[in-house]
Amino acid sequence: MDHAELTTEQVLKRDIPWEQYMTTKLITGTCLQLLRRYDKRSETYRSQLLDDDGPAYVQVFVGILRDIFKEETVEYVLALVDELLTAHPKRAKLFHDTSLVDKDVYEPFLRLLWKGNWFIQEKSCKILALIVSARLKPQGTVANGEASNSKSKITTIDDVLKGLVEWLCAQLKKPSHPSRGIPTAISCFATLLKEPVVRSSFVQADGVKLLVPLISPASTQQSMQLLYETCLCVWLLSYYEPAIEYLATSRTLPRLIEVIRSSTKEKVVRVVVLTLRNLLSKGTFGAQMVDLGLPQIVQSLKAQAWSDEDLLEGLNLLEEGLKDNIKKLSSFDKYKQEVLLGHLDWSPMHKDAIFWRENITNFEENDFQILRVLITILDTSSDPRALAVACFDISQFVQHHPAGRIIVTDLKAKERVMKLMNHESAEVTKNALLCIQRLFLGAKYASFLQA
């Protein structure tokens, strides 16, 4: 059977010759007794054994993985450990019992990450992530991975984290399994990145850039879970300043905004909203969010019927934060936001000659992006007020920019404006006429054509 497609259930149907291992002294008599008591028993019975004598069973399982290299047996013991942790993840604390303080509980799993087949790698990764997470808490006593007076080399927590992060990043770059390598790595990171020390290792391994391509709208249930866990990783990283610097220089923000624009899955929207809330006050994120039209998206999201209270609160906080950001923007930034959102109205800046004189060169940014959007509004908007203001603003550009007439003509605006001269709204026809007059006569005669 292909090891990549093995399941825990299939592996646990095997009969392992424990007595033979005792005969060859690979396990002790005590180990054999414990295994006979545990193996092939009901979940309830095994659960009671773990409650009564959990650390002893952990020692048996770790010992087998350390001393026995037969693939079928290694797979079987990993399946047993995976099963007991899946049933009750808090059992990971058993690996850090004080009775195991001088036992190297990490080494076998860390070694198997690189040397085993996919089933072995996947189980070792999942188990390591759980037992490391159960360990990574400040403690007054010495625990596994920090041998006190022991002279033997024991795998430290730093060794584990370095090896685990290295293997997980390798999976994101070149997965061992075509469909499960990346989801497994992301799922583990979603658990591990809760710990500050892992965030540091992840950033040092240049892991942030490996997440960015995975932030994209999902269609299937499987890809939705991957997207959710990827966004969960980004949310956890949004609490860590060095990671924020990486996020700021990548395409993370546009991708996150595209996800909430198109996603209907509540848990995905929630984690992205909470991430954006964290990033809002950092560096230039706030201004970028405004530029990318996030205020409009938040308004749209608030109008939907969400049941998650964290999401509703996050949307409210994000909306307030964005409003504060808009208040801090320069007059041109505010104007730009108005145009990009398509929410054109007769706000004071449109008819303010000083605004146009001081900001006319800003219209040249990004190959005249704002002017192009104004021209697009003439084609796409059904709002008479937006059409009237767009015509007026184009006429203002023609008046104030030295090459305004030529630029607007090259962008084929004249034809679009002329179509609006027969519009049913008097406000639209008036401003379309003004725009055409300025286009034909140029800035030289513009002073005679005030609206």
Image (cartoon, rainbow, N blue to C red):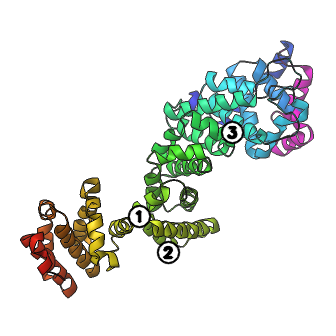
The answer to whether any part of residue 425 appears in the image is: no
Q: Nearer the viewer, mark 1 or mark 2?
A: 1
Tell me the tag on residue 293: 1
Q: Residue 115, position in %: x, y? A: 63, 21
Residue 354 placement: quadrant: bottom left
Q: Quadrant of the N terminus?
A: top right
Q: CA distance from mark 2 to mark 3?
A: 39 Å
Q: Quadrant of the C terminus?
A: bottom left
Residue at 83% from the left image edge and 17% from the top image edge: 152
Tell me the tag on residue 197: 3
Q: Which residues are magenta?
A: 26-55
Left or right: residue 113 compared with residue 89: left
Mark 3 belongs to which amino acid?
Val
Q: Give SS at disc 1.
A: loop
Answer above or below: position of 205 versus 413. above
Answer above or below: position of 143 versus 108. below
Q: Residue 253, position in %: x, y? A: 46, 53
Write down the residue under mark 2: 303
Magenta stretch, overall SS? helix
So how many labels did they put on this image? Answer: 3
Q: Give SS at disc 2.
A: loop
Mark 1 belongs to which amino acid?
Gly
Q: Give the camera-side residue of 364 and 322.
A: 364
Q: Give the camera-side residue of 425 and 309.
A: 425
Residue at 11% from the left image edge and 61% from the top image edge: 406
Using a 10 Å C-alpha cutoff, classify the residue at mark 1 as few (fewer than 14 neighbours), some (14 to 19) or many (20 or more).
some
